[in-house]
Amino acid sequence: MSNREQFDWDHRIKYLLKESFEPKTFQHYKRAVGRGLNNARTFLQSTEELVPSVDTVRTIHQYGFGSVYGEAGDFRAFGQEIAIGRDDARGAYYSQIPKELSLLSKQTSELFREASTDQLKARAVTFYHLRYVKTHPFLDGNGRTGRVIFDYQTRTLLGTDRRIDFSYEEYIEGIQRAFSTGDVSALAKTMTGVELSPDLAITPFPLKLGEIVVTKEISGGVNLKVPCGEDVETAQEVEGAILSPRLVKAVMRGEKVAIELFESTSRRNALIDIDVSKYKKIDLGKGLEIG
């Protein structure tokens, strides 16, 4: 077991396992997931979906991790925000995951339609993988399900001999470079073996997630960024929402609080998302209800 695998096992994986999964050892887990991911590859190939639908993404994860995780196939939910990689970058806000995957599907399909050369094909599959990893739809297994999809895309578009062995360090360095500079060429070369010309290093669509965020000034010039719910198409729909004075005090005390604005909650209401044990809801006309 590598140091990275040991860390993941000790700090995350073993706490997500089904109660019925025995024996609870890393070796047993790794074998079970290996079999599951092979089944996921077979399933994806049977769908012939070069760009998987939202439901297909769920099913890939279910095949891959259904024997070890009770929530396999379920997207991250209420309160399950996640940090990604060495820089602790944030994945998509939980309510935005289906929307992000649908947008990714549309954009990648357009790139595939226009991909007339190996360079364009390599850039397109790299773009999909980067945005999928950035979205991070599941609590665990995002990189592995993403690579199942990537392998199918590269075999279909670039040929069966294009699967490349690469180190985890090369992979992470390529991802970090892409997210920090927008240049996907290093990751494309690492994962597909195709070298992109400089004019193709930047993808036509942004790597940044499309989350809608409204900025609210709360006190003393401090701004609070508020993610919008999935029913909000534009920030203007909730720009009139106000923040409870009691919530503002909680934020200023440094408590971990996040709000999500929905059009359906009207201009006066919002929903507390993170700490459900402490915060039940917020009615901005009456203040914060404490559980």
Image (spheres, rainbow, N blue to C red):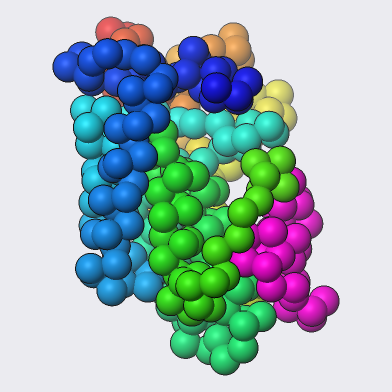
- Closer to the camera, 58 or 20? 20
**Residue located 17% across and 17% down the image:** 20
**Residue located 22% across and 32% down the image:** 67
**Can you give x and y, in whole percent of width and height, for residue 101 in the image?**
39, 58
Image: 19 above or below 158:
above
Spot the residue most to the left: 20
- Based on the picture, tell me whether residue 188 belongs to the magenta stretch: yes
Tell me the chief SS of the magenta region. helix
Image: 28 above or below 289:
below
- Residue 231 horizontal side relative to residue 21, left or right: right
- Based on the picture, tell me whether residue 105 belongs to the magenta stretch: no
- Residue 9 horizontal side relative to residue 282, left or right: right
Image: 193 above or below 85:
below
- Closer to the camera, 35 or 212? 35
* Visible residue check, residue 198: yes
Spot the residue most to the right: 198
**Can you give x and y, in whole percent of width and height, for residue 87 in the image?**
69, 33
Q: Which residues are magenta?
A: 172-201
**Can you give x and y, in whole percent of width and height, for residue 216 in the image?**
57, 38
- Closer to the camera, 147 or 98? 147
Which quarter of the image is occupied by the C terminus?
top left
Number of numbered tags placed on the structure image: 0
The quarter of the picture where residue 186 lies is: bottom right
Which quarter of the image is occupied by the N terminus?
top right
